[in-house]
Image (cartoon, grey):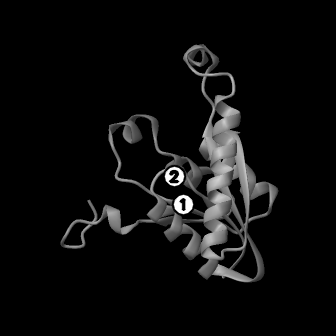
Amino acid sequence: MYRTIICGIGMGSRETAIRLLRRAAALLDHGGSIVVLHVVENIPHRHLMDLPEEFETTAMADAERKLVSLCRELGVPATVEVRIGVAASMLVSAAKERSADLILLSSHVPDITDYVFSSIVEKVLRHAGCSVLIDRGPDQLQEDGALL
């Protein structure tokens, strides 16, 4: 099992977040730690004109509140951390800072932007200094059980 797990959770599906948190708890060594990390993507300043000044602060506080509440609800002992930046870089940095031995992420059905810009998961896989577990949830299965 794993001593320190970085569990990357976005603000997408609640079911995905629950599945990731339960998996992290199941993979954790006795006495180990889970860091739930959410990254508020850094928005280039030229686009901030249409957003309120407190957008990032509000987004960070909202994400932290929701994730702390979910961890408490599930009984998952985790530290919640919210950062601003590029998600893949922040996940890799957090794993390095904490000497994590696993980064746990969820994948999604790829679209054209993943092929052009590459996905967060792909970037984490390429740069992580530890094991990376990609959870492919039931939402990515066809009726016959095959991946989409």
Percent x, y for residue 80? Answer: 72, 58
User: Which residue shows up at 71% across the image and 35% down it?
Assistant: 57
Q: Is residue 147 left or right of residue 36?
A: left
Q: Nearer the viewer, residue 73 or 138?
A: 73
Image point (67%, 70%), residue name: 72
Would residue 146 be seen by someone viewing this image from the given angle? yes
Binning the other alpha carbons within 10 Å of mark 2 as few (below 14), some (14 to 19) or many (20 upward) gives many
Task: Decide if residue 91 is in sight here.
Answer: no
Give the image quarter of residue 131: bottom right
Picture coordinates of residue 148, whole percent (x, y): 26, 59
| Residue carrying label 1 | 105
Q: Secondary structure at mark 2?
A: helix
Which of the two labelled residues, at mark 1 and mark 2, occupies the earlier sequence position? 1
Is residue 3 shown left or right of residue 132?
right
Residue 78 locus on image (x, y percent): 72, 68
- What amino acid type is highlighted by mark number 1? Leu
Q: How many marks?
A: 2
- In the displayed orientation, state which residue is furthest to the left: 144
The residue wearing badge 2 is 121
